[in-house]
């Protein structure tokens, strides 16, 4: 059975990226959701995934781990996951890689929690605020150069670059982060993508026992 192994939808930002890429590419795989314990403690994942992390994809004999590798794999099947124009494509790969490798302070300060409805953190580290400013500027600049009249970073098509930032849009909404007008418009476009709505719908169906205090009790 071809499968995409993901973690709790409410929290697993990397899983969201893999799932969006797989769905955008139309791969026929079954979702296998493993409730996360956090901090690498989810033993079931160790038995399945080579890097002991999710997302992890098995498709037609191929095994793919690391969300960016899954995005690349999906783009081989569905090339529109990267922009068609080579210069736009080079930039899309750069911003997607920048997200995959960076913005650690933001990721630590604002863990994804789809159940949190716009309540800001009581305190925010300067490094996280700096990441937010960088992302805001990156979104605006990319859209200014490549967005044209479309709602996404590279225009009308939702690409791997948008996929990499989709959990960030979710975090900005969950923690009531104030953005520039252009960044805010983009953020809403991502959150309103039909697949994002679908992810939120499925997350809302997860059992309450899967909730983790470390995320739910964050002030
Ligand atoms: N660099 C990896 C990061 C994947 C990652 O950290 N996944 C988390 C869930 S969002 C995980 O599997 N955690 C295991 C655990 O919490 O036990 C990727 O891009 O896929």
Image (cartoon, rainbow, N blue to C red):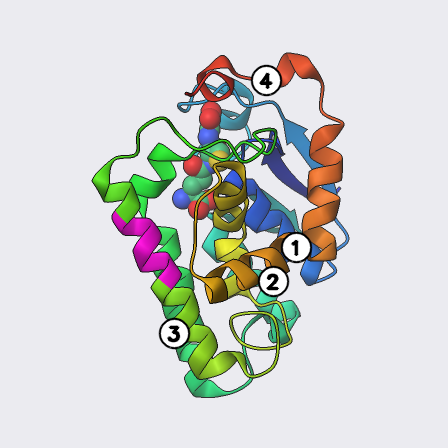
Q: Looking at the image, do the residues carrying marks 3 and 1 touch, with CB atoms under 8 Å apart?
A: no
Q: Position of residue 181 (x, y in %)?
A: 48, 63
N-terminal of the two: label 2 or label 1? 1
Q: Residue at x 40, y 78 (%)?
A: 90
17 vs 178, left or right, is right
**Segment colored magenta:** 130-136
Pick the residue in front: 53 or 126: 126
Q: Position of residue 9 (x, y in %)?
A: 62, 34
Q: Quadrant of residue 8?
A: top right
Q: Looking at the image, do the residues carrying marks 1 and 4 touch, with CB atoms under 8 Å apart?
A: no
- Mark 2 CB within 8 Å of ligand 1: no
Asked whether residue 98 appears in the rendered view, the answer is yes
Q: Which residue is mark 4?
A: 211
Give the SS element for disc 2.
helix
Q: Looking at the image, do the residues carrying marks 2 and 1 touch, with CB atoms under 8 Å apart?
A: yes
N-terminal of the two: label 1 or label 4? 1
Spatial CA span between label 4 and label 3 = 37 Å
| Tag of residue 74 | 2
141 vs 37, left or right, is left
Spatial CA span between label 3 and label 1 = 27 Å
| Crowd band around label 4 with a 10 angstrom C-alpha radius: few (<14), some (14–19), many (20+) | some
């Amino acid at each position: 059975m071809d499968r995409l192994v993901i973690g709790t939808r409410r929290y697993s930002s990397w899983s969201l990226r893999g799932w969006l890429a797989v769905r955008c590419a139309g791969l026929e795989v079954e979702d296998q959701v493993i409730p996360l314990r956090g901090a690498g403690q989810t033993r079931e994942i160790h038995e399945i995934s080579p890097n002991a992390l999710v997302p992890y994809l098995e498709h037609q004999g191929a095994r793919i781990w690391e969300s960016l590798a899954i995005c690349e794999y999906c783009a081989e099947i569905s090339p529109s996951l990267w922009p068609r124009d080579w210069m736009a494509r080079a930039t899309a790969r750069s911003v997607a890689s920048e997200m995959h490798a960076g913005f650690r302070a933001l990721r630590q300060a604002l863990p994804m929690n789809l159940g949190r409805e716009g309540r800001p953190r009581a305190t925010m580290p300067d490094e996280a605020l700096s990441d937010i400013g960088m992302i805001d500027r990156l979104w605006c600049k990319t859209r200014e150069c490549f967005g044209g009249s479309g709602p996404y970073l590279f225009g009308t098509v939702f690409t791997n670059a948008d996929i990499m930032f989709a959990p960030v849009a979710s975090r900005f909404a969950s923690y009531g982060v104030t953005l520039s007008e252009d960044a805010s418009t983009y953020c809403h476009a991502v959150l309103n993508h039909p697949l994002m709505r679908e992810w939120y719908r499925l997350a809302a169906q997860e059992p309450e026992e899967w909730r983790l205090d470390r995320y739910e009790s964050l002030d």
